[in-house]
Image (tube, rainbow, N blue to C red):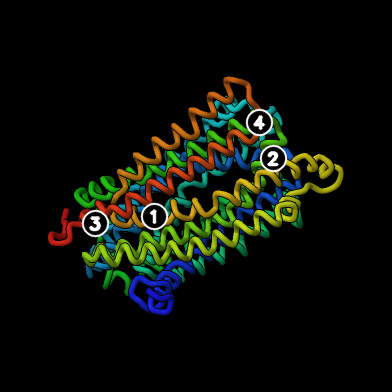
Amino acid sequence: MSVIKRWHAQGGYKEALNIGFPLVVSMISNTVMTFTDRIFLGNYSLEALAASLPASIMAFLFLSFFMGVSEYVNVFIAQYTGACRPADVGRALWQGIWFCAPSGLFLAALLFIADPLFGLSGHPAPIRQLEVIYFQILTVGSLPCLLGMCLSNFFAGRGLTKPVMLISMGSIFINVPLDYCLINGIGPFPEMGIAGAGVATVIGFIVPLIVYGMLIFTRKNEAVYKVRSAWRFDRKLFGRFLHFGLPGGVQFFLDMFAISFFVFIVGRFGPVELASTSAVFSIYNLAFLPTIGLHVAASIMVGQAMGDNNPNRAAFATHSVLHLALAYMGFMAVVFWVMPEFLLNLFRARGEAGVEFGDVLVMGEVLMRYCALFTLLDAVAIVYMGGLKGAGDTRFIMAVMGVSSIVCIVIPLLILNGLGVNSIHGPWIFLLVYVLILASTFSLRFTKGPWRRIDLIGRDTPERS
């Protein structure tokens, strides 16, 4: 099919961009907040920069399981929309809320295990102390983060992604200046260092949650989607939600566990290795997080097509999203390859502390080449994963992520650590192999098509509690 025909076709480029572009902008907004956060911390001190990555990844590791489950509300709403069952949208949204509320309270309680947890890292004491502070603040903010993400699915699942984009963009104007002021003690704000970065992040979770609540629980939405009256716990729908959503949560957790383990092993090599990896991961988010927006777009488009019992349209839509993702990631790969020094210098600390950044810069340039190599592979893995999720094939994704993370990341890095091999190349090569396996496996699974036979919502028999 020609580019012009694919642009105008249902499930083509135009529809993919209409749904996906606001999500990409939303993810870019989150990336900007994370990126500037790391830049501010890098300018504040090298220790703060080094501590920010393992602490934020560990907080996100615990959050990832619950986030992966709650995110699946998106697929249910998409399929109910495709099946022309708007009254079930409110029911699906509330099951996500019932899941998120106790999950957020559980995550907040993790602040009590921060000290022994980071004591296992083997990182230098000054960095470990900062890791504990940052981790504790982020975990306390998990509840508004989960609830805000759950509520955003009310719009995203129906293909109305512009409100999500606008709210995410608005968060930048709150988070970024507040982040800078709280880290450095500007104006009436105290100098809080890495703790200030954590507080600004949590406030950045709370404000969107309030806005989503005001936009969703209106009389107009109640009349169509039952967003108020469907508040009761629905045992059957909640069970179906967990049946498909729990594997998604486990998959997300396993992926984050592999990355977390990677970072902690690299952190044992030394502060230069940890700081350079922190900077490179922050830069890579410029490519990765926007592609996650396309991943969600693929899930929405596939979900709506499958709700309409049209798997061929679902496959067509997934490949439209894949083409867009490859174009974007290809551009970012070129940027990473030709501009590593410029990007890394954004993290250089002020004054004399910046002298220590020379070794970080040298190592970071090498690591940026690795990033350039696996961006395209990552695009393939991310988009096909989104397509499979939208159809409900979450158990297969969970199994592949579990085996790959253990075989490609955990076991090889344990062997390297046991042998005392401290070369930075080994962990990054294993990370590259990990992404290669995910891309090839998910591509093959999607092509074979067992996901076409999955009935996620019970199309012919609407469930009632």
Place residue 174 in its image quadrant.
Answer: bottom right
From the viewer's perspective, is residue 132 above or below residue 18? above
Disc on res. 275? 2
Residue in view at x 45 percent, y 67 percent: 20
Mark 3 vs 4, N-terminal side: 4
| Residue named by callout 3 | 452
Q: Residues within 10 Å of mark 1 (few under 14, many from 20)?
A: many
Image quadrant holding the N terminus, namely bottom left
Residue in view at x 47 percent, y 65 percent: 324
Query: Label 1 amino acid?
Result: Tyr
Cα–Cα span, label 4 and label 1:
33 Å
Q: Residue furthest front?
A: 1
Query: Label 4 amino acid?
Result: Ser
Mark 4 vs 2, N-terminal side: 2
Cα–Cα span, label 4 and label 2:
15 Å
- Per the image, label 3 sits on a secondary structure element best described as helix
Mark 1 vs 2, N-terminal side: 2
Query: Label 2 amino acid?
Result: Ala
Does the residue at mark 4 contact the one at mark 1 (Cβ under 8 Å)? no
Image location (x, y in percent) of residue 430: 53, 36
Q: Residue furthest left?
A: 461
| Residue named by callout 1 | 384
From the viewer's perspective, is residue 14 above or below residue 249? below
| Residue named by callout 4 | 423
> Is residue 174 toward the left or the right of residue 207 in the image?
right
Q: Residues within 10 Å of mark 4 (few under 14, many from 20)?
A: few
- Per the image, label 4 sits on a secondary structure element best described as loop
- Nearest the viewer among 155 and 328 is 328
Disc on res. 321? none
Cα–Cα span, label 3 and label 2:
45 Å
Does the residue at mark 1 contact the one at mark 2 (Cβ under 8 Å)? no
